[in-house]
Image (cartoon, rainbow, N blue to C red):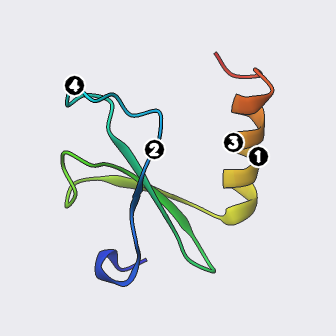
Amino acid sequence: MDQEDVRWIKSSYSGGSGTECVEVAASAVDVAVRDSKVPHGARIELRPAAWREFVGALLEGRLS
């Protein structure tokens, strides 16, 4: 996923104090997650099915 080709969306759960700033971008092939304070740094890329499973596990409280 090319960083210039996607729209990054900041998580509504990110803190306003300059910490915990997570952004997500999606394409037809990947979902990417990065730290908004370091936009050109490391990021995690997942397939959409893996992202759905991760978010589902969070919503259901299966992850702590």
Q: Are marks 1 and 3 in contact (CB under 8 Å)?
A: yes
- Label whose residue precedes the other's in the sequence (4 or 1): 4
Count of residue discs? 4
Say the numbered circle drawn on residue 11: 2
Q: CA distance from mark 1 to mark 2?
A: 18 Å
**Between marks 4 and 1, how big is the CA–CA gap?**
29 Å
Q: Disc 1 marks which residue?
A: 53
- Which badge, 3 or 2, is on the more N-terminal residue? 2
Quote the CA–CA distance across marks 1 and 3. 4 Å
On the image, the x and y values in percent for residue 29 come to 61, 78
Residue 7 shown left or right of residue 57 in the figure: left
**Neighbourhood count class around disc 3 (C-alpha, 10 Å): few under 14, some 14–19, many 20 upward:** some
User: In the displayed structure, would residue 52 be above or below residue 56?
Assistant: below
Decide which of 49, 17 is in the foreground and name it.
17
User: Which structural element holds mark 4?
Assistant: loop
Determine whether the residue tagged by mark 3 lies in a helix, strand or loop: helix
Which residue: 47% across, 33% down?
13
The amino acid sitting under disc 3 is Phe
Name which residue lies at 47% across and 40% down: 12
Going by the numbered disc 4, the residue's amino acid type is Ser
Question: In this figure, which residue is indicated by the disc labeled 4?
Answer: 17
Task: Give the answer, above or below, for where 26 lies relative to 39.
Answer: below
Gap in angstroms between the C-alphas marked 3 and 2: 15 Å
Say which residue label 3 marks: 54
Mark 4 vs 2, N-terminal side? 2
Q: Nearer the viewer, mark 4 or mark 3?
A: 4
Q: CA distance from mark 4 to mark 2?
A: 14 Å
Point out residue 55 in the picture as x, y percentages from the top left corner.
69, 42
CA neighbours of label 4 inside 10 A, class few (<14), some (14 to 19), many (20+): few
